[in-house]
Image (spheres, rainbow, N blue to C red):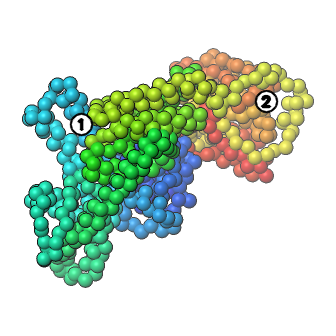
């Protein structure tokens, strides 16, 4: 998407989410805008999902998730630039009218805390992978200054991750961000870190302190900040206003840091170890079955946007064992969905499908970003998605059996493969290759056909003329509710904005107008060509439901006397929706100094209770354009 379109897209997204007054908070992950809203019923998911630049919309985990793809950060920034929504203190608004449950609350909390730092974590993980590649092939050694500085850049993010999470958790729990960061800094303070490494016995007010390692930990600081938010609420009520500025942080630090060292930290550390050992025990029980099941269900986890909810387990695995296997087992899913998308790309002859599948397959295999592939291609045609899921399960079983792990948080792609060098690396490569090529081959031969495309194909009967009796029957048939599709792709404008009084005043009937992107004008419904002007500039169609539709290509184009119009049908011919009617040379029309705006009019408007355009700023040929409500 061109950068200039982010402004329009951001405004439309906020509008269809219900406006800024319906938004409690907004964060983004690698591919999605994640809205927490007051009232889910105020969200227009239908129009939201039809916006150009939006891949799909999910109502999952208590959030409205708008899947954008690789440009999500640009759209995120544009939202705050072009609306009165503020990035600061978004959670300060009370949540009203939302349905709460344990899963929604958990997913909303996890995504709100981790999503803002995932970019930094992913970048640091990739930098670690590149350093492993450089040391493996002899470009750098661990004692070189260059390596040490770059390794500090990569490992620093994970070593001091409690500081990052303290800030985001404080925003989520509405605590003082800098006091929260102060607590995290105390947990990774060099003197106490050294005391843990040396096995010192410390006490606080003669109470023994159980020292644990807080570097790279995630659970202790999150719980500590949550407790801080509750403490601050109490302090705000009892601390005098005159000294609140310094006394509240003073008491908060003096209470929370010892409380974390004495109680919260040891308990959270134990919980984290149990979580990590529980997962590894499950995999160790039967790695093939466990890995296969994880790989099989992972595409669904990505589809519903809950996959980042597993980040705490991954971070605990790394902190406890120095490596993670969960994201390693599920990693080949990226390759499986990339391969399935490649299979569609190679098989299809449809230009529009190729334009979507090509970049999506490349993004998945190079960057590990699978949402465009899943929502734009594999899930759309269903069979490729399930083929990818099966090969993801097969690959997961292989990876689990090989015991592959990664020392850092990594997304699986070609560029991050060096990060998996170590135990089980060969097995991981084999699994990724099977997932990628297996999904591509099976999808190519058995998983996709252009017959799956929703656009109906013209049959022999559609090109035959109908009798006068058939035509008269269609014209005089019972008027029923109908949806009229767009005959052309382009920008949608109101009929009142058309620069011709006959159309803008509604004298010819109600409808809408499209400024076309190309000259292919197609049937907006099943019906009969009731009028075909010899000049080709206008077509009348009587739909099978009784709507009399007039498509007028451009303004005053009758003066061209047919020049620039290639007529494909004749009067009295039955047509199917999507069948080509006329090909107009838009460049020639513009060169003649004429407006190419194309009104789509319901000529028998008076026979309907209402003719209502669908709310949209642009439309693709074949998408819904008008709703005709019968009396």
| Residue 234 or residue 413, whichever sits in front | 413
Q: Position of residue 397 (x, y in %)?
A: 45, 38
Residue reaching furthest front?
A: 285
Badge 1 marks a residue whose secondary structure is: helix
Label 2 secondary element? strand
Mark 1 and mark 2: Cα distance apart in space: 62 Å
- The spot of residue 387 in percent (x, y) is 55, 33
Q: Is residue 339 above or below residue 124?
A: above
Q: Viewer-nearest of labels 1 and 2?
A: 1
Who's the residue at 63% across and 30% down the image? 453
Residue named by callout 2? 528
Camera-nearest residue between 48 and 391: 391
Q: Residue at 51%, 62% (x, y): give it.
A: 39
The quadrant holding residue 558 is top right
Q: Identify the mark at residue 201; answer none if there is no mark.
A: none
Residue 608 seen in this snapshot: no
Q: Position of residue 285 (x, y in %)?
A: 43, 48
Residue 14 visible in the picture: yes
Q: Which residue is mark 1?
A: 127
- The residue under the point 10% across, 57% down is 198
Q: Which x, y percent locates residue 591? A: 52, 20
Mark 1 surroundings: few (<14), some (14-19) or many (≥20) residues within 10 A: many
């Amino acid at each position: 998407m061109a950068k200039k379109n982010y402004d329009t897209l951001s405004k439309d997204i906020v509008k269809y989410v219900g406006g800024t007054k319906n938004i409690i908070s907004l964060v983004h992950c690698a591919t999605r805008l994640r809205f927490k809203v007051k009232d889910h019923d105020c969200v227009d998911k239908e129009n939201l999902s039809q916006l150009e630049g939006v891949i799909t919309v999910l109502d999952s985990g208590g959030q409205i998730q708008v899947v954008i793809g690789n440009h999500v950060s640009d759209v995120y920034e544009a939202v705050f630039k072009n609306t009165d929504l503020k990035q600061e203190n978004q959670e300060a608004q009370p949540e009203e009218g939302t349905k709460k449950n344990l899963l929604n609350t958990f997913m909303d909390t996890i995504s709100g805390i981790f999503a803002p730092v995932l970019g930094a974590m992913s970048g640091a993980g990739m930098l670690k992978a590149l350093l492993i590649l450089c040391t493996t092939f002899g470009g750098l050694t661990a004692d070189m200054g260059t390596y040490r500085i770059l390794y500090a850049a990569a490992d620093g993010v994970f070593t001091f991750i409690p500081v990052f999470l303290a800030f985001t958790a404080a925003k989520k729990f509405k605590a003082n961000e800098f006091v929260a960061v102060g607590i995290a800094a105390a947990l990774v303070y060099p003197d106490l870190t050294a005391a843990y490494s040396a096995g010192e016995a410390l006490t606080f007010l003669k109470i023994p302190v159980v020292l644990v390692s807080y570097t790279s930990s995630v659970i202790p600081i999150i719980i500590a900040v949550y407790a801080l938010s509750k403490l601050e609420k109490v302090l705000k009520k009892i601390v005098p206003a005159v000294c609140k500025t310094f006394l509240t942080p003073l008491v908060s630090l003096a209470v929370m840091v010892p409380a974390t060292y004495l109680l919260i930290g040891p308990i959270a550390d134990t919980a984290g170890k149990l979580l990590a050992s529980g997962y590894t025990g499950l995999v160790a029980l039967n790695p093939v079955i466990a890995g296969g099941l994880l790989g099989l269900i992972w595409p669904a986890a990505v589809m519903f946007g809950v996959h980042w909810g597993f980040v705490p387990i991954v971070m605990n695995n790394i902190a406890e064992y120095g490596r993670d296997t969960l994201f390693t087992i599920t990693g080949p899913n990226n390759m499986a969905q990339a391969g399935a998308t490649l299979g569609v790309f190679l098989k299809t002859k449809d230009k529009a499908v190729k334009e979507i599948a090509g970049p999506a397959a490349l993004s998945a295999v190079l960057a590990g970003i699978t949402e465009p592939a899943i929502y734009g291609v594999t899930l759309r045609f269903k069979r490729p998605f399930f083929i990818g899921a099966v090969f993801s399960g097969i690959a997961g079983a292989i990876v689990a059996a090989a015991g592959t792990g990664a020392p850092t948080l990594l997304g699986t792609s070609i560029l991050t493969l060096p990060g998996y060098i170590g135990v089980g690396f060969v097995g991981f490569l084999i699994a990724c290759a099977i997932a990628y090529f297996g999904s591509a081959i099976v999808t190519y031969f058995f998983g996709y056909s252009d017959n799956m495309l929703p656009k109906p194909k013209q049959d022999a009967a559609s090109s035959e003329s109908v009798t006068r009796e058939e035509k008269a029957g269609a014209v005089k048939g019972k008027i029923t509710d109908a949806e009229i599709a767009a005959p052309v792709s382009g920008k949608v404008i109101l009929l009142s904005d058309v620069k011709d009084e006959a159309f803008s005043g509604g004298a010819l009937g109600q409808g809408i107008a499209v400024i076309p992107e190309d000259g292919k004008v197609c049937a907006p419904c099943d019906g009969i060509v009731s009028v075909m002007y010899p000049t080709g500039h206008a077509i009348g169609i009587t739909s099978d439901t009784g709507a009399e539709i007039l498509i007028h290509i451009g303004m005053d184009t009758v003066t061209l006397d047919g020049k620039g119009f290639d007529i494909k049908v004749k009067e009295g011919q039955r047509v199917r929706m999507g069948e080509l009617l006329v090909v107009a040379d838009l460049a020639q029309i513009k060169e003649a100094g004429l407006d190419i705006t194309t009104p789509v009019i319901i000529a028998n408007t008076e026979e309907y209770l209402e003719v209502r355009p669908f709310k949209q700023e642009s439309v693709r040929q074949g998408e819904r354009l008008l709703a005709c409500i019968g009396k």
